[in-house]
Structures are given as C-alpha cells and as structure tokens.
Amino acid sequence: MTAFLTRTRGRKRLHWTDWMAYAYLTLGVLLMFGPVLWLVLSSFKTERELQNYPPRLLPYVQKMETVPGYDKPLPIYKVTAGPLAGQEVAQIRRIGLISQVVKPSDPKTVLKVPFKDRKAVEHVALATSNYSKLFERFNFFRFFYNSTFITVMATLITLLVNSMAAFALSKYQFRGRGLVMALIIGTLMIPPTVVLVPLFLIVRDFGMIDSLWGVIIPGAATPTGVFLLRQYMLTIPDEILDAARMDKASEWKIYWRIILPLSAPAIAVLAILSIMWRWNDFLWPLIALQKQENFTLQLALNSFRGEFTTDWASLLAMTVLTLVPIVVVFAFLQKYIATGIASTGGK
Amino acid sequence: MSDLELRGVTKAYGNVEVIKGIDLKVEDGDFCVFVGPSGCGKSTLLRMISGLEPISGGDVCIGGDVVNDLGPADRGLAMVFQSYALYPHMTVRQNLSFGLENLRASKAEITERVTATAQMLQIEMLLDRRPKDLSGGQRQRVAIGRAVVREPQIFLFDEPLSNLDAELRVEMRGEISRLHRRLNNTMIYVTHDQVEAMTMADKIAVLRDGRLEQFGRPLDLYNTPDNIFVAGFIGSPKMNFFPGRVEAGGLRLETGTVVALPPGKFMLNEGEQVTLGIRPNGMQPAETGLPLTVSGVERLGGESYLYGTASDGTAVTVHCAGQTKIEPGTQIALTLETGEAHVFSTQSGQSLLRKGA
Amino acid sequence: MLSLITPLMQIIEWPMRALQRILGPRKLAWVFLLPNLFLFGFFTFLPVILNFFYATTGSDHILLEDRPYVGMRNFDELMNCTSYLDPNSCQIDLFWRAVHNTLWFIVLQVGFMVFFSMTTALILNRKIRARGFFRAVFFFPVLLSPVVVALVWKWILQDQGALNAVLDHFGLQTVNWMLSPTWAFAWSVFISVWFHMGFYTLILLAGLQSIPRDVYEAAAMDAASPWRVFRKITLPLLMPTMVVVLVLSLIKGVQTFDEVYAFTGGGPGSATTLVIQFIYQNGFAGAPRLFGLASAASILVAIVLIALTAVQLWITRRNANG
C-alpha cells in the first residue's frame, strides 16, 4: 500500500519536493474550489440556518411529519428533559416559552413542553426554499432572459461581423488594407473603460440607453475576434477559394459556404469567449441599463448589495444560478476555453 | 468552337512585369502543355486565362470572343488545381455538385451528371466520403471529376500531378490522356516536368521568364529547338553544349577538336562564337575524337550513361546502348554524329539552322 | 441553428451578388469590412475624439452643445495638488486617493499574481498525477463573473461568515473584515489575485512547456543542480513569457473595477476606490454628473494604457520575430 502511494511515474520513491508539490496543489484545490463550494452549500440552507453562528458545514433541514388531524406537516423535536425526555414530538404551535406538541403516535393528546427542553430533529438535506423564494420575490426569469438575450444576440452579431471583416482582411488584396489593420490594432489600445462618457452619449443618441441593444451593439466588433479569425483564415489555402470561383460561387457564397465552415474551430473559440465576456459583463451594462426590468443577472446580483442589510438567502441562490451556465459550459469545453483564452491573451 | 487565343497578353505587379507579352493560339480540341522552369510565369498565365488573375494588357479570346472582362465562372472553363483544392468540409458528391448548384442546374440533372462523371472516373464508391479520407490518387480523380462534371469548353490543369508519387504520376498521366481522347476538349496543362509535356501534349509552349520561347509539337521542339534554352529544357538527359567558333566551314571547339558540319544546313559566319549542341545519344565512344575524362558511369542494364568532363571543363553526358565496359577515371574519345548536331549563336542563343533546310 | 443561418445567408446573398457585379470582387472587400468598421467607428473611434471635447468642457450637461468650453480646467483641477503624495492636499482628493489606491493595488496584485502563478506553473510543469485536473482547478475562477467572485468572498468574510467562525473556533480574535479599511483593501487584492491567477498560470505553463526537453537533458548530462537548472535555463528561456505576463497584468490591473466595486463598493470610505470607479462615479453615479472631470481622468488613464499596450505589442512582435 505504501509502495503504491509513494510511487511516481518514474517508479521511484517520491522526493520531498514531490510531497511539497502535492501539498501545494491540495491547498490550491481547497482555496480555489472551497469558497465556491461553500457558497453552493450555503444556498441550500434554510434562512434560519443561514443566521446560525457559527455556521455548520452541511445544510440541515428539520424533520417534518404529517400528523393526522393537521393540514400542514409539523416540525419534529426531541424532548431533552421532563417526563417525555428522549421522545420525538411534533410541535403544533409555540406560545411564549411553552411549545404545544403531540406525539405522532397519539395525535389527539396535546402536550406542553418547555421551549428550552426541546431540540429540533435535523438531517442533512438540501433546502430549496431559497430558490423558490427567489422566483416568488424577484423577477429572476426577467434577469435571466435579459442576460441570455444579450449573450446570444451579441455573440451571433460578433461572429457574423468579425468573421466578415476577418475574411476581407485575410483573403483580399486591396488598397487601404494596411490602414484598416492599423486601426484595428489601435482599437486594442482603447478599452471601453476609458471612453465611457462619450460612449454613453453616442449610445444615447442612437436611442439605445436602457435597452438591451445598447449593451449588445457597442461591443459587437472586437479587435480580438477579428485577429483570431483572420489568423485562422490565413491558413485556408487560396486555391480552395479559386476553385469555388471557378465553380461560379459569388464572393458571399465563398464566405458562408467555404470560409465559415472551414473556420469552425476558430469561430468556436470566439463564440466561447464572447459568451463568457457577455455573460459576465458588468461595467458597461451598469451604465447603460437603468430600469430594473432591464437588468442582467450580474446587475441584479449587484443591486442586492445593501450597505447594512443583505438578503443573503436570495442572493446566494441567485449567485449559484448565475454561476451554473458558465460552469456547465466549462465542464464540457474546458480544454478549448483554456487554449482559446491563452491564445488571445484574454481580451 | 472552343479554341483559345492570347494576343499580346501581359501581367505586371506594380513595376514588375511577370508576363511580357505572349501571343499564342490553341486550336479546338488540342492538348496544350505550358512548360518551363519554376518562376517562368506559366501558372500565372494559366490563372490569367482562367480569369482568377486580371490581365494587365492584351486580349484573351475563347471561341473567338474577347473574355477579358468576364469573371472566372463565366468563361466556360474548369480548372484542376495543384493542391486539388477540394472543399474539405464537403463530401465528394457535394464537391462535384457545388458548381452545378451555383449554375442553378436542376436536382435531377445534378444527380445524373455527378453519377455519370463518377462512373467515368471510377469514384462512385467514394461519393459519400470526405477528401481527408481519400488517398492522393483518389483526391486527384475527384479534383478532375469536379472539372469534368461542369462540361467546360476548356480544361485548365495547374501542375495536377506534382503532389503524387512517381508510380501514380505515370498512371494518372495515362488517365488524363485517355480523358482527353474521350472528351476531345481543349485542355491546357501546366507543368515543370518536360517528360509530362513530351508524353501528353499535342502542342507544347515553352515559357521562360514571362516570355514564350517556342510553341509547337513535342517532336518538333525536340528535333528543331529554336534556341539554347528550349534545346536544353526539352529532352532527358539534357543536351550537351560545347562552346566554339566557326572556322573554315566547320567548328573549332574550345577543346581544340574540329567538327565538320553538314554543308548548308546552318547559317554560319566565319569567326562567329557559336555553341554546338548535341544530345547524349548523338555521341559514341571511339578510337579518336573529342577527349573525355569519365568521372561516373551509370549502368541501367539495357543502356548506360557516362558522365565526364571535356578538356575545357564542359560537363558531358553520353548515352551508350547496352552495358558499357568503360570504368570511371579512364580517358576516352568520342565521335560526334554531326547529323544530330544543333548550332546556336552564343551571343543571342538563337538556333542557326537554315529555315527550310 | 444551421437551419436558421442558411436562409439568412441566402437572403444576404442577393444584395451581395448585385454589389459584386457593380463593385467587382476587390472592392467588395470593403463591403465585408463595413459593418465592423461602422461599429469600430461609432463606438470606439468617435468616443475617443469626443472624449477630448468632454474633457475640455464643463457643467453637468451631457449634450456637447450645452457644455461651455473651459480649456484645461478639468485637468488643472485633477492635477491641483500641493503634494501628489498626500491626497488630502489635492483639490480633487478622491481622484488622488483613487490613484494611490490603484498604484498600491497594482504593485501588490501584480507582484503576488506573478509570484503565485509562476509557482503554480512550475509545479504543474513537474511530472505529477492528474495534471489536467489541477490545471483546471486553478483556471476555474477565471470563468466566473466578477460579481460572483465578489459575492463568494463576501459571504465568507462577512461578520458572521465562515472565516470568523474558523478564527473563533481556534480562539482567535475575529475581525469585521469589510469595515476595516486596511483589511478591505488587502482582501480586494487577494480576491483579484485569486480571480485572475489561473489565466497567467496557463500562459506561463505554455511558456514552460515550449522549452525544449533536450535542453534539460543536456543540463542533466552537465550535472547541473536543480537550482542551477532553474536559474540558468528555465528562467532565461521563460523571460519573454514573463514579460508578456507582467505587461498584460499591468494593463488589466490599471483597468480593475468590476470585482472590487462589487466586493466593497469602493469602501469603507474611499479605502478601495480605484481610478475606474472614480470615473464611473463622477460620470454616472454621482450628482451632479461631472462628465468633464470623468473624461479628463479617463484620458489620463488612457495615456498610461496606450503606453503599456505599445510596450506589449512591441514585445510580442519582438518575440514573434526572435
């Protein structure tokens, strides 16, 4: 057993540096996954459980039982002192310091137990109340729809517009191409964070402030996207385009029947990047969207942040729901995302 | 009529002229090969004919009509590319249909023509595969099929066999020739391989540096090359060239050897610097004659080649029938069969053959 | 999806074919470029130009024609300090606090980030089991949204949060992290490193893996010690990647806003207010809206960013050529 554990790939005993490395990595797993896992676990705790201090690791819910004669399931307690000590009882109501309880086996007889002499019977379970409350109290689907609409439309427009530009810049020789390339490199230097004020004016003049389009359109042409696609399209042999021209394909047909399908890998990378950018986007939506009904999930999450009181129960549930789509995408496309992001320098 | 005529066609990129005025007429049904060393402009010329490359000057006429301003698809041509340029994301069937779809042919007609073409080229069983699942030879057939299915007036081939291995190349050479006999279309074929040119062409156009050096039937080019370049380019192994000067109706070579030429066959001026060209099979080892130091011998069984240098340093190749006994390092002498000799002006490179002789 | 795209593309084909006939295939390239150039023009280049107009005009009107020309006054106000080292001596003290915060933030964040991503990359480059899993673990936060990252950590750091519970458990002094200026700032740096570290780890790991194996084998034949191998082979060969990481993280560091704003809102007080937040607050959140001041500040930020990006482009080009 020890031999098995201490065997590395080279079948030699682990060096002390190997132990250090694994220790570091284990710590890393705890530090990277732990907080998110903690948040997800917390989101399945009841509101009362959330206020408990110190918090418990796992979510617990109180045992509930349907007792004949009562419409709703009743919470179950264990009595800790007095004549009923050690028995499980169902609480009907609580009056001051006294709980009125019944034995589930004998629902007719109402008994009285001092409030401090009973302890809730709990078991580990996921409480979904935070989620159901979220849907009741907030227009969650509205936010979810806004985020999804922005992400999907913006990604489609980005793909179309950027691939058209990349096609022109990779497959045509024309006067002014160098200038256009220089301009696009120039836009790399001007992140939207430094032109917020005039951008706001322009988007307002287009009548797109407080409209989802005001978030979608300004960022649809990304220099990163143009570069990424152009680089890939340069590897498609020109002879294939010539063959298509001999086959009487128009330039537009060459673009969408030949170039687009052949650039699929690069387009997929850009699509993933764009989905991530848009889903997680914060600063520009914060400026461009003002009515709550237009908020994206990120804005809605942010708006929960009160100075002193925070509705953590709903906030936790909503955070998890915001996080889920990206984690799902990540789980399936981890490798592509990683290489895609590394190859473009992030943004 | 689907003959092709080029009238003073030129092409320039900025100040660099790559095609320097070419006149050429390919008759209907001819198999014409453009041959020349790499960078001679033969592929550019083909692309100018196809319409993929705009021309800078002159006219391209197909079937008597000037087509300078027509796009590549409207000239009634089809082209087979060096890299095949099959659409990698489409099946063979889709590759063949794509052009017909663009021409708005009916579904039934597309199916019929694709099937017929596939049968002719024996690629029916490949129709649902993608190019990456095909061998080199199969891809080649599909590329040809994509051209054939369009039923073009003229076929253009841009070095179609250069990506195949030697054995397959010979096979496909025969195949394309058979295709030509069967369809009887005009075909224009670009290659840098003079063997391909000699074996396949009805007419060969030898190009060098953007100029047409000679245009004619393969054996005419072999037998009566217009200049040193064509003489050296056509025929394998290459023709041997000896510098010399005209002296008393004959030639005195730099090696000192005097060669007598058939009287009246060449236009010779006393004292002129000329180059004697003689093919490897126009010389035989003999008791006396041109001295040669043999440096290498290749015995191929049925024939042998001797490689050596003449006394003035000229590299010489000699073809011998059968299995020669000559060893490397020996000194031999060569007799020249002057009936097979060519004489060129050293200065201009032009043949000095008297026209009509 | 495909059944949706095909008809759309076929519809666009008609006008495009007509344009091709009129313009010819070469000029058609401009048609392909047009949508992209339109978007770049209106939403990137035009804002850059207008930014200068805003920076040189005053009042809280958004329309340029309502704004009186004030020359360099906005810049003068921003730069009006007795001592740049003491924000209290400045006319716009919040701006200089934000500048100081941002500088500290960048120094700490970039320093820790480069150190930890380098360490992680070196460890992941060793012969370890389940390397793909560990790499994914470190990369995973990069995908989260800044707001989610902020909330994840706020949940842990709140007064009744998990961290205080752990401290309590071990009998240590608990802290109300978010109310302490120093701790709020420190945690802002920490979550920013936590958030972005995986990205730089990935770049450095790619750099490490591109070092040819035979170089290490040659060093092993020369009996070099592991430390010497690291100093004399790994570090010099990794230098170009290191520089890229450094410049990239600087560029992003200057622009940091999202995760810190969602984490602390800039507080307590102005302890975690960064420059971009200053721009945001003056232009969009405060009353009156000081567009001029916001634009002037953003021009100052842009100058820094353009300089950094120019360095980055220069380095990437040099790396690509070398």
Image (tube, coloured by chain):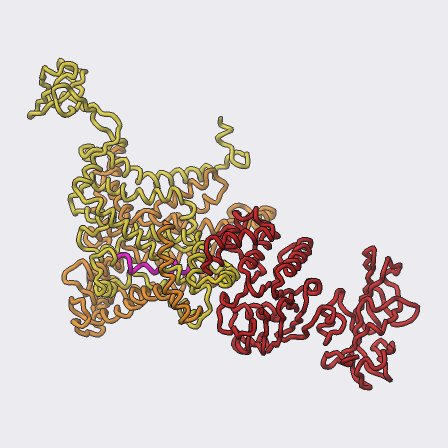
Q: Nearer the viewer, residue A177 or C149?
A: A177
C77 w.r.t. A310: above or below: below
Q: Residue at x 9, y 17 (%)?
A: A110
Name the tint of chain B in the rendering.
Answer: red
**In the image, A186: left or right of B295?**
left
**Residue A152 x, y percent position in the rendering:** 31, 51
Q: Which residue ends up furthest to the bottom in the rendered image?
A: B270
Q: Which residue ends up furthest to the left in the rendered image?
A: A96
**Residue B307 x, y percent position in the rendering:** 81, 64
B236 w.r.t. B96: above or below: below
**Residue B262 x, y percent position in the rendering:** 85, 78
Q: What is the number of callouts on the image?
A: 0
**In the image, A106: left or right of B6?**
left
A132 w.r.t. C190: above or below: above
Tell me, yes or no, whether the highlighted magenta stretch contains residue C193.
no
Name the tint of chain A in the rendering.
Answer: yellow
Q: Residue at x 70, y 70 (%)?
A: B217
**In the image, B342: left or right of C55?**
right
Residue C237 shows in the view: no
Tell me, yes or no, whether the highlighted magenta stretch contains residue A219.
yes
**Residue C3 x, y percent position in the rendering:** 37, 50
- What range is drawn magenta here? A215-228
**In the image, C136: left or right of C150?**
right
Residue C292 shows in the view: yes
Q: Nearer the viewer, residue A33 or A276?
A: A276
B235 w.r.t. C252: above or below: below
- Quarter holding residue B275: bottom right
Q: Nearer the viewer, residue A299 or A97?
A: A299
Name the tint of chain C in the rendering.
Answer: orange
Q: Nearer the viewer, residue C203 or B163?
A: B163
- Quarter holding residue B214: bottom right
